[in-house]
Amino acid sequence: MLIGEYEHSLDTKGRLIMPAKLREDMGEKFIVTKGLDGCLFAFSQNEWLNFEQKLKSLPLSDKNARNFVRFFLSGATECELDKQGRFLISSNLREAAKLEKETIIIGVGTRLEIWNKDIWKSCDENISADEIAENMTMLGI
């Protein structure tokens, strides 16, 4: 399970270090794509296949479903760790998540989220566990 919060810096070439504690679960090759809330999502190859199957099951006749699939697949790219445990984030994905220098990588179970540090801190400060807990009853939690 992918968990934890890790702070790393992008180098001048747009490479980011994969935290050592996450490397085994992510594997040598993995998929990075645009995520929700202004971050990037990173999936191991197995988790990407699961996610891709869910996307494939969406109805082509539904415009929102088509746009949802386009959003995730259009920017998706396979990344590979180099010998130093770094991976290159393409310029279009760096732009989409406003990644400049300081980043935060968080594990959220089945995927990683890669955030601009300032955007993550702002988002994290606005998360109210009590408010979320009240709304989770609708989901059966």
Image: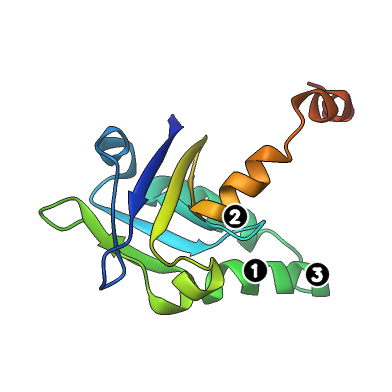
Q: Residues within 10 Å of mark 1 (few under 14, many from 20)?
A: some
- Which residue appears at 87% of the width and 30% of the height? 135
Question: Residue 132: horizontal and vertical position, in percent?
Answer: 80, 30
Is disc 1 in contact with disc 2, using a CB cutoff of under 8 Å?
no
Q: What numbered label is drawn on residue 64?
A: 3
- Which residue appears at 26% of the width and 71% of the height? 12
The one nearer the camera, 47 or 133, is 133
Question: Residue 16: horizontal and vertical position, in percent?
Answer: 30, 57
Is disc 2 in contact with disc 3, using a CB cutoff of under 8 Å?
no
- Which residue appears at 40% of the width and 56% of the height? 102
> In the shown orientation, is residue 2 left or right of residue 78?
right
The one nearer the camera, 50 or 90, is 90
Q: Earlier in the sequence, mark 1 or mark 2?
A: 1
Q: Residues within 10 Å of mark 2 (few under 14, many from 20)?
A: some
Question: Residue 88: horizontal and vertical position, in percent?
Answer: 29, 66
Image quadrant holding the C terminus, namely top right
Which residue is the site of mark 2? Answer: 119
Which residue is the site of mark 1? Answer: 69
> Which element type, helix, strand or loop, lies under badge 3?
helix
Is disc 1 in contact with disc 3, using a CB cutoff of under 8 Å?
no
Q: Earlier in the sequence, mark 2 or mark 3?
A: 3
How many numbered marks, from 0 up? 3
Amino acid, disc 2: Ile
